[in-house]
Image (cartoon, rainbow, N blue to C red):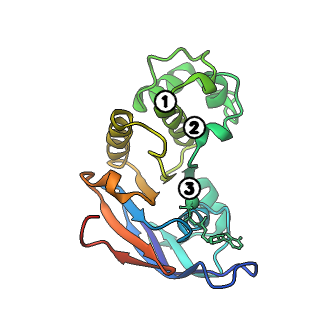
Amino acid sequence: MLELSGITYAPATAGAPILDGVGFQTQKGRPLLIAGASGSGKTSLLEIISGLASATSGSIRWNGSAVKRRQLRWLCGIVFQFPERHFLGLSVAQELRLGHRRLGHEREQSVLERVGLDSIASTTAPERLSGGQQRRLALAVQMLRGAEVLLLDEPTAGLDWSVRRDVLDLLADLAREQVLIVVTHEPELFQDWDCQRLRLQGGRLEPMTTLP
Ligand SMILES: Nc1ncnc2c1ncn2[C@@H]1O[C@H](COP(=O)(O)OP(=O)(O)OP(=O)(O)O)[C@@H](O)[C@H]1O
Ligand SMILES: [Mg+2]
């Protein structure tokens, strides 16, 4: 279980606090969807959860124990809004092996299968994959890292309807075994997704009782 309490984020460069006492609990089984307008602080929140940025105050607990920024970096895997911009490998296999020089064929295949990429030749260049396949590859990279918490920033941005459906089904499936948090400014695209829903507004998180 991942638990945030009283998270405030007020970088000196920002006029007002970006996050102002944010808290929630989430666990594997069901994804958490956080909706918020552009500029509401969604990406900042993911950066804090994943240890890429430091909260000004507040605490983060994992299975009941307080975790520091360094541990969060191990625990969490973030899939950015446009993962294709962050690929470094020249092929799918190379991308998966960055940081895993001894990655066995079996482990590689099982992760590719888990994200539905097992029918793609591992020699394919990441930039030749479709938008949906690139999201899957970015997820596979984070899963290989052993991330127990998957954080996704606008995972369906720029995908067409049927591909978006497939990605959402995959995420719902992964969420059964992993903590999974999605942030979006388009909650209407997630209308029939089975998830816990919160809204980020004015630096605070509140339950989203009505669907958009
Ligand atoms: N380190 C920082 N210093 C100053 N301001 C910051 C910093 N990080 C983020 N901000 C500001 O905080 C606000 C929230 O930014 P953030 O990127 O988290 O929003 P977002 O909800 O992800 O928006 P979008 O939907 O457009 O991606 C913005 O006004 C941004 O300019
Ligand atoms: Mg953002």
Please name the amino acid that badge 2 sits on.
Answer: Val
For label 1, the residue is: 133
For label 2, the residue is: 141
Say left or right for 7 vs 205. Answer: right
Please name the amino acid that badge 3 sits on.
Answer: Leu
| Disc 2: CA contacts within 10 A as few (<14), some (14-19) or many (>=20) | many
Say left or right for 188 vs 203. Answer: left
Residue 29 shows up from this direction: no
Q: CA distance from mark 2 to mark 3?
A: 14 Å
The N terminus is located in which quarter? Answer: bottom left
For label 3, the residue is: 75
| Disc 1: CA contacts within 10 A as few (<14), some (14-19) or many (>=20) | many
Q: Position of residue 102 (x, y in %)?
A: 66, 27
Q: CA distance from mark 1 to mark 2?
A: 12 Å
Seen at 55% across and 62% down, the residue is 46
Q: CA distance from mark 3 to mark 1?
A: 24 Å
| Disc 3: CA contacts within 10 A as few (<14), some (14-19) or many (>=20) | some
Q: Secondary structure at mark 2?
A: helix
Q: Secondary structure at mark 1?
A: helix
Q: Please name whichever residue, 199 or 122, is drawn nearer the observer in this view of the structure.
A: 199
Give the mark, 3 or 1, whose residue is nearer the N terminus. 3
